[in-house]
Amino acid sequence: MSDQIARMDATAQAALIASNEMSPAELVESAIRRIERANPNINAVIHPLFDKAMDTAGGELPDGPFRGVPILLKDLGPFSQGDPWHGGMGVLKKLGFIAPFDSYLVKKLRRAGFVIVGKTNTPELGILPTTEPRAHGATRNPYDLTRTAGGSSGGSAAAVAAGMTPVAQASDGGGSIRIPASCCGLVGLKPTRGRVSMGPSIGDVNHGIVVEHAVTRSVRDTAALLDVLAGPMPGDPYYAPPPLRRYAEEVDAAPGRLRVGFTTRRLTPDGRVTDAEPDCVAAVERTAALLGELGHEVSEARIDALFAPEYVPRFIAIWAAGVAAGVTGWEEVLNIKIGAADVEPLTWALTEMGNAVPSSTFLRNWTWMQVNARQVQRFWKDHDLLLTPTVAEPPPQLGTFLEPPDNPIQSLFRAALFAPFTPGWNVTGQPAISLPLHRTESGLPIGVQLVGAYAREDLLIRIASQIEEAVPFSHAATMA
């Protein structure tokens, strides 16, 4: 039965509870057994919370839509009271930092009936699109244990792909939901900026670049999770326009005939414009053909504003300032001084870079990005969706993004070559979703990305559901 459960999405697992086929304790215990069996090979779950989970599952659970369903939290972003929070940082692991309260997101998950069974691995401060922190070691891709699961939500994605839990919480500051979803063959939606509250301790991260949601096995789970998490909370500095109806109601709803532009061209860190790798190009071409067969108007397109040569250095400068602010913030929380020996070389290099950027330069960079974002919006006058690869190459070998000792920043530029299609939508604040629609000859997952206009998660869910029905997603990596 456990093997069957491992292949179910969260909606199906919730139905087992609702029909009294299983109790919450039985369902949670089965997830714990799968984690114990699969995690030694994958290293996705770094903080098991099994005793607490069994106590929760055996008690009075809220009568929410996911009553008794096990879930994992990413060890970066929201707090869960009384649990470790390391953010991939060795210094927090050494100090044994424990979260003092539940973030709003975690409270919403608990009210929905989810049972938290553990926390997942993440790169230090979520910087890289691979999950290989020195503090906790590398997370391995369930499809090929020699390759990356992506990042920074790689632990969450690897766990769901392996069948440990049906969903896992994730966050996205430059592709950190979509990249691991692509690498691990999952659905990964980055919501609109301000859709999910980051409170109460945080208003936003780096002017709203970072957003929270989840990685899932199905579109219906992605929609239902967004219904659970979406909505403003007290103290939020801003919030996204409310949807006209529940996102779950968009599943199976007809999307209408959509105008879809597609591109496989990427901007490299040195300012060149090139095609993505052949497998990623093939994934987009196959999806474009499928969309045409489904009755949509599909044409090749280009958004010139995304190919401005200043884009990459300006984004990295903003990102560096965010890393520096994160390190300084933990110094204040912990009342300690964090030095080069306390963090990874790339983290320290970005911290120094961020601290060297004058505040006026930081604001000018953001002003440039905001103007650029408005230029990008012109595309949506004539199109409903943009289709791109999620990443520019298949999941690389572990170690690909490790920093050279003499030039740690080089690993960030290598990351930009791998994931050029995702960060722009963190800047514009638009929703984007990665869908598992292609495999390499060796069986590695390749995702495609669909980008919607601002606040149009509803449209992304409709088209993603239509695609899933036409080409059901396969989760061949389930091994728990």
Image (cartoon, rainbow, N blue to C red):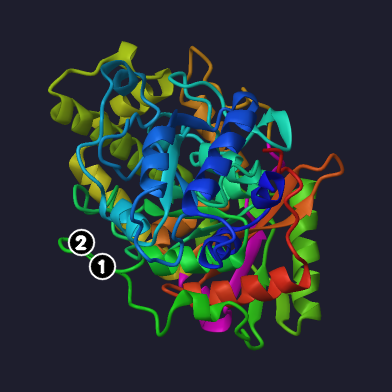
Q: Amino acid at mark 2?
A: Asp
The image's mark for residue 232 is 1
Residue drawn at 40 percent across, 85 percent down: 244
Most foreground residue, 295 or 6: 6
Residue 188's spot in the image, x, y percent?
Answer: 55, 56
Mark 2 and mark 1 in contact? Answer it, CB < 8 Å.
Answer: yes
- Image quarter hosting the C terminus: top right
Q: Is residue 134 left or right of residue 13?
A: left
Residue 398's spot in the image, x, y percent?
Answer: 64, 25
Q: Is residue 25 magenta?
A: no
Q: Is residue 83 left or right of residue 164?
A: left
Residue named by callout 2: 236
Whole-Å distance between the Cαs marked 2 and 1?
7 Å
Secondary structure beneath dot 1 equals: loop
Most foreground residue, 474 or 10: 10
Residue drawn at 74 percent across, 75 percent down: 291
Q: Amino acid at mark 1?
A: Pro
Residue drawn at 34 percent across, 78 percent down: 242
